[in-house]
Amino acid sequence: MAQIPNLDNAPLNLRALREQSQKELINILKNIRGRKCLVVDPKLGGSLSLIIQTSILKEHGAELRHLSSDPIQTDCNKVVYLVRAQMDLMRFICSHIQNDTSKGLQREYFVYFVPRRTVVCEKVLEEEKVHHLLTIGEYPLYVIPLDEDILSFELDRSNKEYLVDGDTSSLWHIAKAIHKLEFSFGAIPNVRAKGKASVRVADILNHLQTEEPVNSNDMAVPEINTLILLDREVDMVTPMCSQLTYEGLVDEFLQVNNGAVELDSSIMGAQQDGKKIKVPLNSSDKLYKETRDLNFEVVVQILRQKAMSMKEDYAEMSTTTQSVSELKDFVKKLNSLPEMTRHINLAQHLSTFTSKPSFLGQLDMEHTIIEAESYDICFEYIEELIHKQEPLVKVLRLLILLSVTNSGLPKKQFDYLRREILHSYGFEHMGTLNNIEKAGLIKKQESRSNWLTIKRALQLVVDDTNTVNPTDIAYVFSGYAPLSIRLVQQAVRSGWRPVEEILKLLPGPHSETKRGGFLSSSSYDSLQGASTSNDKVTDGRRTVVLVVFIGGVTFAEISALRFLSGQEGMAYELIVGTTKIVSGNSLTESFMEKLG
């Protein structure tokens, strides 16, 4: 299991949030006396690893298994299922129970739904005639702290469910998660939302506040001053670009899962080849915390300098006579050696990808598409990728980028590329193309693109980007400032009113609400950069702005938000909430399905 992140320096008391989730899970286990087999839905396994150590589960008599179609091998006579409410998982549970019954095994079965039960799932259990054999409960795990400033609602399918299947259940889940946070940190006085899903979540949040009010009188000043809700759909350009921060690149090429990356041990310098090891990546690793948000070029330089300085220290130590305190300092430095070695190995491995001509060519093309000045060159580049049968996900990413910035593709070219993709990759990808079209990510052009207007008004392309000492968030993509983060920057500095006209050019409605009973908090209209006396929580910390991405956020965007948060004169701490951390690949793959 991945290392549990240290939350001591979080702007909010996230540790208490995590402890509450631990306690709820332990209570479930305590209430089922004796030994039991805890069967965990594999997708939940990673999430749980960020909340509780396996050893604690074992202390409470739980023998751990992952849920699959295979029958459970255990001699425990109590089986506890911990699952998300999904039909395929219900079928696994039914087949396990039917298999036990056919063998004459008598067991007690418990199903705990995360975060809540659904009628549809219980119906499956009834139809398969196992419902009466089960004790059913809920484990209300709505929010997982991934790091000091990142909260995840762990809804990896929310984008496709909402945009393609028209399933809005994830929106209720997000609102419920935020409402749960309000019980810990006070009702949030200011809410800004942009996009259909975000405006809907803001509405549901108000309904929840009416049904189960968070009593604002108990708290002098709510700890979260403002909630900014953003649909991923509002900015599909950013995730389709290749991230150029250290953490972003690790995710692009090696896939970060639940704060860890799984690698061949040989990459990390171990002798046994072929063995996989998990490398935890969170702010508990000091060197990672220092480098993860930097542009990768700079990280390589920093690691080189650190290695050189250590080498010099070592040479000095072996030649001269040292005082005890100097020796102590040197030993302290040596303690950071494992971290250094880990990141030098990781950076070296990443360099094998970033130095490839194909990657550099792709970066060039992404930039050309964002500049929106050479449509034909971009079209031909994508056509060539299809004919070379480059990975389909790479083709679709660039195609989505081209379509979004051009407000679609001319009908003739749209039909042509669609046909070429099916010929080149097979007709089983028809479902994928239909999903992407239904989500509006690749479409036929029906109106003129307003991308150039948006790009200029929000200064999305910044020439002369300084990646070593950045002065603007554009450093995370070496020259492109993420649109989503420009909107956050605007909301925090001077509100959205000055950019009202630009907001109208982006997908979906927007809303701004000041929720009742918070007249003491700073004026809503200007979440200004300069701090007002009410913006400080009583103990002198800055108040918090919670930025929630519905449909996922990339690590590069998180880095850009951290950069904003660290700016001089910034009156707010920014915390990220997201349905899931995504990259262009994982986002595109969420729409992919093979027919047959």
Image (cartoon, rainbow, N blue to C red):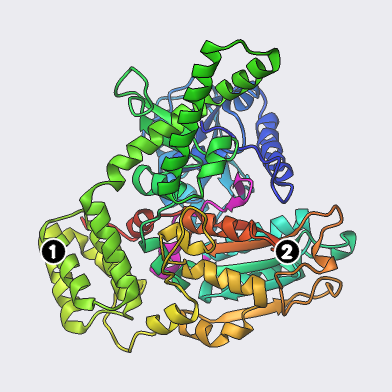
Quarter holding the C terminus? bottom left
Q: Where is residue 231 in the image (x, y as percent from the top left)?
A: 51, 69
Give the image quarter of residue 377.
Answer: bottom left
- Residue 67 position (above or below residue 139): above
Which residue is label 1 attached to?
Answer: 384
What amino acid type is highlighted by mark number 1? Glu
Neighbour tally class for label 2: few under 14, some 14-19, many 20 plus, Cα within 10 Å: many
Q: In this view, does 58 lie to the left or right of 70?
A: right
Asked if one can make out residue 133 in the rendered structure from this viewpoint, the answer is no
Please name the residue shown 64% across and 56% down the image. 566
Give the image quarter of residue 562.
Answer: bottom right
Which residues, given as a range, are shown in magenta? 144-168
Q: Is residue 158 left or right of residue 522?
A: left
- Most foreground residue, 64 or 347: 347
- Most foreground residue, 493 or 106: 493
- Most foreground residue, 219 or 569: 569
Please name the residue shown 40% across and 55% down the image. 243
Q: Helix or strand or loop: what does disc 2 sit on?
A: loop
Indicate which disc residue 571 carries. Answer: 2
What amino acid type is highlighted by mark number 2? Ala
Asked if one can make out residue 388 in the rendered structure from this viewpoint, the answer is yes
